[in-house]
Image: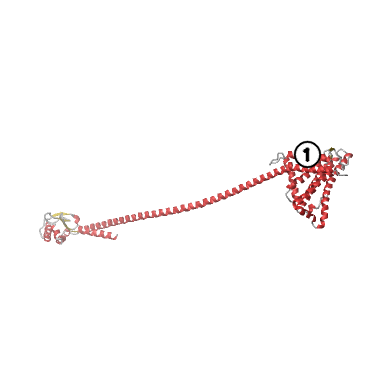
C-alpha cells in the first residue's frame, strides 16, 4: 500500500507531471459540468423531479450564504457552491474502487483554501476599500493587528489541514481495513466516510462563507473568529 | 511529506475552471428559472390584485350607480307624487266645482219645486176656500145670491171711466150672468139699475153660471164688469198666491 501523503505522476505533459488528484479532479469537473449542462438544458416553470432537486441544492446554498453573510448570495454563489459540490464529489469519489479522493491530497485542499484566501482578501478590498479592509486588522484594538494577521494564515492553514486530515484519515483507515479484512468489514466505515465527506464539504463551504462574509460585511464575531471543531 | 507544486497549481486552475463551468451551466440557468418562476408568481399575484382592485372598483361603480338610481328613483317618485297631488287637487277642485254646480242646480230645482209645491198648495187652499165659500153660499136663500149684488154691479159700472162705460150697450148686447136663473123682477131691477148707472137703457141677455156662487157679471165682447163671489175669490186667490210667492 502506497502512502496517501506521497504523490507520483501518472504521466507527464511536457515538464508537468499529472498526478492522480488532478485526473480525478478533471473527471469530477467533466462529470459535474456535463451533468449540469444536461440537467439544465430543459428547465421549466413547472419543475420535474430532477429540476426540483437541482433547485433545492441551489436554493439551499443560497440560504446558507444568505443566513451566514446576511446579504445577497448572488456574487458568492458560484464560488461557494462550486467548492461545496467539488469537495462533496471528491470526498464521495472514494466509494469508487481504485479511486482516491482528490481532497485526500493536501495540494487539492490547499488549492481550494488558497482560492478562498484570495477571494476573502479581494472581496474585502473591493467592498471596504484597501484602507477599510486593512483597518479590520486593527479591530477591536491595534494590539490585535499581529494576531489578526496571523489569524488570516492560520485559519487558512486549519481549513487545509481539517479537510485533508479527515478525508485522508478515512481513506487511510479504509485502506488498512481492506488489507486486513477485505469483505464486508469496510462497508460501515465507508458509510461513515460518506457522512464524514458530506460534513467536511459542508464545513469547508460554510467556513469559506464565514471568512468572506467577515471580510466584506459587518463583523460577526461568533461566525468569523470561531471555527467548528474538526 | 512534500507538496507537489504542479499539482497545487493545476488543482487551483481546476477549481477555478469548475467554478466557471458550474456558474455557467448550473447556477445561472437554475437561478434564472427560479427568478422566472418568482416573476411569474408575482405577475399572477399582481394580476390577481389588479383583478381584485378592478372588482372592487366595479363594485364601487355598481354601488354608486345603484345609489344614483335610488336617488333618481326618489326624485321621479317625488315628482310623480307632486304631479299626482296636483292632479288630485285639480280633480278635487273640478269635482268641487261640479258638485257646487250640481248642488246649486239642485237647490234651484228644489226652490222651483218648493215654489211650485207652495203654489199648488196655495191654489189648492184657494180652491178649497172657494169651495167652502160656495158650499156655504149654497146654504143661503136663492134671493141672497142675487139681490145685494145688483146695486153693487151698478155702482161698479157707474165708477167706470166714460170710455169704459161706453163699451157696455149698443151695438153689442151685454150679457148678464147669474148663478141661477133670474126672475123677471130681478131682470127688470137689474136693467133699471144699469140704466141709471150708464145713463141710457140697456138691453140685457141673461145667462146662468153656477160657478159665480153669488153675484152678477155683466159682459160684452169689449168689457166686463164683475160683482160676484167667483171674481172676488179669484182675486183673493191671486193675492194669496202672489203673497206666497213674495215670501219665497
Q: How many marks?
A: 1
- Indicate the quadrant containing the N terminus of chain B: top left, top right, bottom left or bottom right: top right
Query: Which chain does the numbered disc 1 sit on?
Result: A
Left or right relative to A160: residue B105: left
Q: Position of residue A8 (x, y in %)?
A: 87, 40
Taking depth in this image into account, of B146 and B151 the one nearest to the observer is B151
Residue A53: tell me if it is visible. Answer: no
Q: State which quarter of the image contains the C terminus of chain B.
A: bottom left
Residue at 20%, 59% in the rendered image: B232
Q: Which residue is labeled 1 in the image?
A: A30
Say if residue B61 shows up in the picture: yes
x, y percent for residue B200: 10, 59
Please name whichever residue, A125 or B47, is drawn nearer the observer in this view of the structure.
A125
Residue B96 placement, left or right of A117: left
Residue A59 appears at what percent x and percent y?
73, 45
SS class of the residue under badge 1?
helix
Whole-percent x, y for residue A97 in the image: 84, 38
Q: Give whichever of B53, A158 is nearer the camera.
A: A158
Residue A215 in the image: above or below residue A37 = below
Mark 1, Cα crowd under 10 Å, few <14 / some 14-19 / many 20+, is some
Amino acid at each position: 500500500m502506497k502512502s496517501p501523503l506521497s504523490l507520483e505522476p501518472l504521466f507527464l505533459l511536457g515538464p508537468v507531471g499529472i498526478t492522480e488528484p488532478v485526473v480525478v479532479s478533471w473527471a469530477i469537473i467533466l462529470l459535474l459540468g456535463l451533468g449540469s449542462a444536461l440537467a439544465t438544458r430543459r428547465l421549466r416553470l413547472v419543475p420535474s423531479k430532477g429540476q426540483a432537486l437541482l433547485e433545492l441544492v441551489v436554493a439551499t446554498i443560497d440560504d446558507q450564504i444568505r443566513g451566514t453573510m446576511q446579504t445577497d448570495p448572488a456574487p458568492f454563489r458560484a464560488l461557494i457552491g462550486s467548492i461545496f459540490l467539488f469537495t462533496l464529489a471528491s470526498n464521495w469519489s472514494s466509494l469508487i474502487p481504485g479511486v482516491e479522493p482528490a481532497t485526500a491530497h493536501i495540494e487539492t485542499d490547499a488549492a481550494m483554501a488558497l482560492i478562498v484566501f484570495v477571494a476573502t482578501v479581494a472581496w474585502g478590498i473591493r467592498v471596504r476599500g484597501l484602507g477599510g479592509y486593512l483597518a479590520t486588522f486593527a479591530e477591536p484594538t491595534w494590539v490585535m493587528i499581529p494576531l489578526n494577521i496571523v489569524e488570516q494564515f492560520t485559519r487558512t492553514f486549519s481549513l487545509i489541514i481539517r479537510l485533508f486530515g479527515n478525508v485522508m484519515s478515512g481513506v487511510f483507515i479504509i485502506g488498512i481495513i481492506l488489507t486486513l479484512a477485505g469483505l464486508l468489514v469496510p462497508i460501515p466505515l465507508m458509510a461513515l466516510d460518506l457522512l464524514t465527506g458530506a460534513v467536511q464539504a459542508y464545513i469547508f463551504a460554510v467556513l469559506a462563507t464565514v471568512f468572506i462574509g467577515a471580510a466584506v460585511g459587518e463583523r460577526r464575531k461568533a461566525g468569523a473568529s470561531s471555527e467548528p471543531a474538526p | 511529506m512534500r507538496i507537489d507544486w504542479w499539482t497545487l497549481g493545476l488543482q487551483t486552475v481546476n477549481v477555478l475552471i469548475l467554478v466557471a463551468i458550474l456558474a455557467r451551466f448550473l447556477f445561472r440557468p437554475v437561478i434564472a428559472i427560479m427568478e422566472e418562476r418568482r416573476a411569474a408568481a408575482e405577475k399572477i399575484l399582481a394580476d390577481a390584485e389588479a383583478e381584485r382592485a378592478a372588482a372592487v372598483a366595479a363594485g364601487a361603480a355598481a354601488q354608486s350607480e345603484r345609489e344614483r338610481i335610488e336617488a333618481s328613483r326618489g326624485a321621479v317618485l317625488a315628482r310623480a307624487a307632486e304631479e299626482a297631488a296636483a292632479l288630485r287637487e285639480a280633480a278635487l277642485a273640478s269635482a268641487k266645482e261640479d258638485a257646487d254646480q250640481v248642488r246649486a242646480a239642485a237647490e234651484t230645482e228644489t226652490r222651483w219645486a218648493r215654489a211650485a209645491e207652495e203654489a199648488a198648495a196655495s191654489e189648492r187652499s184657494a180652491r178649497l176656500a172657494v169651495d167652502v165659500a160656495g158650499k156655504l153660499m149654497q146654504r143661503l136663500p136663492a134671493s141672497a145670491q142675487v139681490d145685494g149684488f145688483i146695486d153693487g154691479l151698478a155702482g161698479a159700472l157707474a165708477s167706470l171711466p166714460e170710455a169704459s162705460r161706453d163699451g157696455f150697450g149698443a151695438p153689442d148686447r151685454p150679457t148678464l150672468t147669474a148663478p141661477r136663473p133670474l126672475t123677471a123682477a130681478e131682470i127688470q131691477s137689474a136693467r133699471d139699475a144699469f140704466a141709471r148707472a150708464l145713463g141710457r137703457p140697456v138691453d140685457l141677455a141673461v145667462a146662468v153660471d153656477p160657478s159665480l156662487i153669488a153675484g152678477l157679471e155683466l159682459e160684452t165682447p169689449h168689457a166686463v164688469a164683475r160683482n160676484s163671489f167667483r171674481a172676488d175669490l179669484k182675486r183673493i186667490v191671486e193675492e194669496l198666491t202672489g203673497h206666497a210667492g213674495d215670501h219665497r
